[in-house]
Amino acid sequence: MRNPFQPLKKDNWVKPYMKKYKGLLCLILVLGLLTFFCGAALMFNAGYLISRAAQRPDNILLIYVPVVLTRAFGIGRPTFRYVERLTSHNWVFKVTSDLRKRLYLTLAKDAAFFQQHFKTGDILALLADDIGHLQNLYLRTIFPTLISWFLYIIIVIVLGYFSWFFALGMALLLAIIVFLLPLVSIAVTSARVMQKKQLTQQLYTDLTDNVMGVADWVISGRENDFIAKSQPTLKALRKETLATKRFEWRRDFCIQFVFAIISVALLLWTNRYFTTSPAAVNWAAAFVLSLFPLIDAFAPVSQGVEEWPIYMSSVTRLNNLKPQEQALPQQAKLPTTVPPISFQHVEFAYPNEPNIINNFNLNVTAGEKLAILGQTGMGKTTLLDLLLGDLQAQKGAITIAGVPVAALQEQRKELIGMLDQKPFLFNTTVRNNIRLGNLEKTDQEIDEALKAVQLGPLMARLPKGADTVVEEDGARFSGGEQQRLALARLIVQDAPIILLDEPTVGLDPITEKALLHTIFSVLAGKTIIWVTHHLQGIQNADQIIFLEHGKINMQGSPHTLYQENARFRKLYALDSGE
Amino acid sequence: MIDKQLFSLSGIKKVTIMLVGLTVLQAFMILFQGKYLALALVKTWHLRPLNLLGPLIGLFFAAFIGRHLINWVKSIVLDRFANQASQSLREQLLTKLFHVGPSLVAKQGTGNLVTMALDGIDEVDNYLTLILNKMLNMMIIPWILLIYIFTLDVKTGVVLLLVVPIVILFMIILGFAARDKADKQYAGYQLLSNHFVDALRGLSTLKLLGISKQYANNVYSVSESYRKQTMAVLRIAVLSTFALDFFTTLSIAVVAVFLGLDLLNGKMPYFPALASLILAPEFFLPLRDFSSDYHATLNGKNAMQAIRQLLALPEATQRQALTSLTTFGANDELEFKHVNVSYENNNEHDLADFSFKVHGFQKIGVMGPSGSGKSTLINTLGGFLLPEVENGGQILLNGQQVPHLSQEQWQNNFVYMPQKPYLFHATIGQNIAFYQPKASREAITAAAENAGLTIWLKQLPAGLDTVIGEGERGISGGQAQRIALARAFLDRKRRVLLFDEPTAHLDIETEAALKETMLPLFKDHLVFFATHRLHWMQEMDQIMVIEAGRLVEMGTPQQLQQKQGAYTQLMTQMKGAKL
């Protein structure tokens, strides 16, 4: 079996924060201990109180102290517990804020890494979940376990004061519950956790096939296959779950069995130890009764520790995030006039793949509108990533106004703006979204940008105008409107080079036509590189290139291509429906 | 307090009766555990030697073990019941999904349905495992103990009895206060809790805008204000646990003091006092257990409600009404007469007064501006949407009237191709043979060849046996369409083709190549082709122009061209400027 504590050896996502907030952490542990102490002390006191009272002492003052203490512990237990719960949650949320910022910065560091690994939202959600798992790691595993350990030490020391022999026996019995069974739990469940995770993933795939493919299932008429599809996975999953549960039932019974032995041992010991005199005998009930509240501190440790493997896979994933920060050369500073762009003998390949860009040469003059066409996977978007500097070419040079793009990274936002297939809108107001383009713009300038992209009337119709929240994924607005919002953000950003990555894919032709018209009229004068999937609006381009296998295989102005190139004519005819 | 939907589960009666028996037995075990523990301690208190304690300790031990053995048995019983009930619920959910079909997915959202079938059912399972046991414990154990405590000492019994309503009252009041507080903050709350994922997903945009580093502080401060808001709610929410804790612990302290005073005054002997004290915490234990799992059960309860609501949705009946069509042929006819179709919650018709008639292997182009009802028509033709029964609309196949097209016979006759065909997590071969799982390898290879997949398949090491779909290698839009086309090439008995914007996401070159493959397939098929892409219209025999759910024009391309009506108008709107 793999060592379940391995992920913590070189960890820097869990331990540093326990150090950073160690004051509060100690407070939580002390409060936790006090809670259980009060619980035990209450029963201890009560046991003593009634035993002593039953001897009917002449002086009521003799039981006065236990009476007061009983009330004090009675109030103390819930109060400490309340404060402990709040403090521990507060602590965990504090750490969460730190972790979130850190995860964010880690991912923000490395552009290329991010591009390749984190394009899908799934992985991002997974990482966000990992931080949620760390919260539970603290609340459900680390805190209760630490508290139980301290309590264990205290109990053994206290008993040792009376009888080292009995203390040793208790230490061994309690060790079964505090150390042995939790370790057994990890050993037994960690293999199962992995197996279960795989099966759950398989079930997810099966069910997705059922749900997403339901139209095809209905048409095929294979109702029995449809229902049966997930049965084998469900059966296997049930088998695993049942095996885990059976183990838990057995283990929980073992824990109680040990407690039964401990209570019998306590009964026997107190009978021997405290029956020396009528005064001493009152402690017998006190000791025995104080055991029962403590069961609550020890019994759940195994359950909490059992979840260890789940948390450790999150810890491992976070620790494995090692962004390669790109070493930037000496940074240059360009004036923000409209510059020319040049690609010279550029070659690029993704790791372990053949070249996607091959000896690629292209000059884009200042203010030129270039359209790039080509089939999926021919490297259109790769060219844009290279120009942005998010990817680095293995050979050749990419320059803006003669300066390599790597030397312009710090100035990038002033030079390049981009509009892609589905613009990302943050879940905040329209105005805030647009202001992200340039934080210094006034509300008035933002409203002007909104008017320029023809959203003025729409904003006027909304009850809250430009203060309307766009909702998750911009859901408040249609696809065309979302593109216009992103375009307004570009206007506010006011960079001289604009990259368009298929901004109209998925839009209907009428919306597309109107959007392209707006794009090219508000961005007139800028250098534009426009990746497009078809020829609608192609008259806006000064130059068109067709990419195939990393090279240009057709190039020219729309008019020249139309007159001289039969293939272009055919595509054009297709696109315009003639 | 008792969830009524539980009674609808099969086998619930038997399980409940069993559990009641076990719980009563367990209550006595707890009672004996306390009683014999007290008796043993009394002997010690009287300074009796160990050998006199022996039998009492034995009985205490037996009761202690018996109590937990019963827990074990209960776990087994409950697990079996919960598993059976939740599995049957999952099966019902899947059956429902199959019968209601894509419109259910459209309404519920894909993610939502998968989550419901996966996590929702697990939550129900958990709910069923917990709720019955906790409820019965609460309804049985304290009261048996209380009766015994009354026989020991009336005053203690009264104190314990009085605390229960106080605790419940406080928990209800504080529960409401917490909910109020949470409700007030809800909107802002959601925004804050999703902010982090939003920031991660928008990271590349933030980088482009040059503010990714600055935004880190924003991430931190939003997380901090989330913490403060959450803590404000928690302070009240945790108060209800505090109230439970406070009153129960304090009442034990009070009982101890009362008992002490009575003992002091000689009003009662040692044993009943000790036994009452030992049993007092046990009296409250079931209530505590119930409240600590309350939130876990709440999720399960809600999940169960959501699933049951879904199961109650209406589904298509008379799926075998159609009998006059085995294989659609050159002489078969389909006719719509004044058909109306509406999506739920929509006052206007999505298809209104829709009438047309097609005969044999015609190719019908469906055009119209975005949102005009093209997809609604294709979905109605596929039987995924059911027309309204009122208003006297009729659908006729070969003259036989059917209530809707969710007809088994009809659905055996067509192939449906949406904008993005769904690819199953299976091999390419299995995906192609999805409608005919028993097709021979040769037939599948031939269909792949016809669909223009051969060159691509040769590049794949495993060829037709390459696994695709969820979590596997990515497939480009063009290849996905070709795999769906291969289904049509494979199944020659399916002579109707329903296309819903199949090329909208493709680049022009891919579309041009795909068109070459598709045109031969159109021969000897009835084709409905909804699209925005104008060039397809040249290949059609008839064109339907839809506007706002109404069929405004229908005719051959030439007729419509001459007519200079809606069709030509739409063409001009869509066409770009000429080069």
Image (spheres, grey):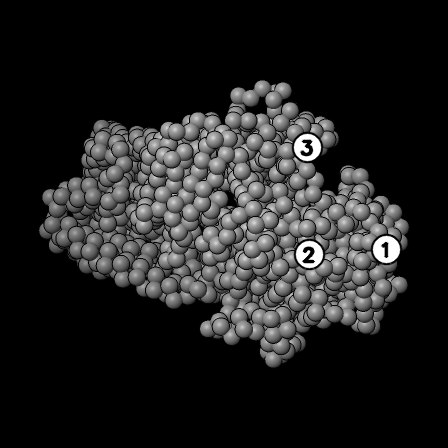
Q: Tell me the distance, in whole angstroms, between the alpha carbons under discs 3 and 1.
A: 34 Å
At x 77% / y 50%, what residue is drawn? A569
**Chain ID of residue with mark 1:** A
At x 41% / y 43%, what residue is drawn? B336
Could you tell me if the residues under marks 3 and 1 are in contact, i.e. CB atoms within 8 Å?
A: no
Residue A157 image position (x, y, % from top left): 44, 45
Quarter that holds the N terminus of chain A: top right
Q: Quadrant of residue B175?
A: bottom left
- Mark 1 nearby-residue class (10 Å; few <14, some 14–19, many ≥20): some
**Type of the residue with mark 3:** Gly
In the rendered structure, the answer to whether residue A97 lies left or right of residue A403 reads left
Residue A194 image position (x, y, % from top left): 54, 34
Foreground mark, 2 or 1? 2
**Chain ID of residue with mark 2:** A
Q: Which residue is mark 1?
A: A362
Q: Which residue is mark 2?
A: A536
Residue A73 lies, with reference to residue B516, above or below; the image says below
At x 73% / y 48%, what residue is drawn? A571
In the rendered structure, the answer to whether residue A271 lies left or right of residue B218 reads left
> Element at badge 1?
strand
Q: Which residue is mark 3?
A: B452
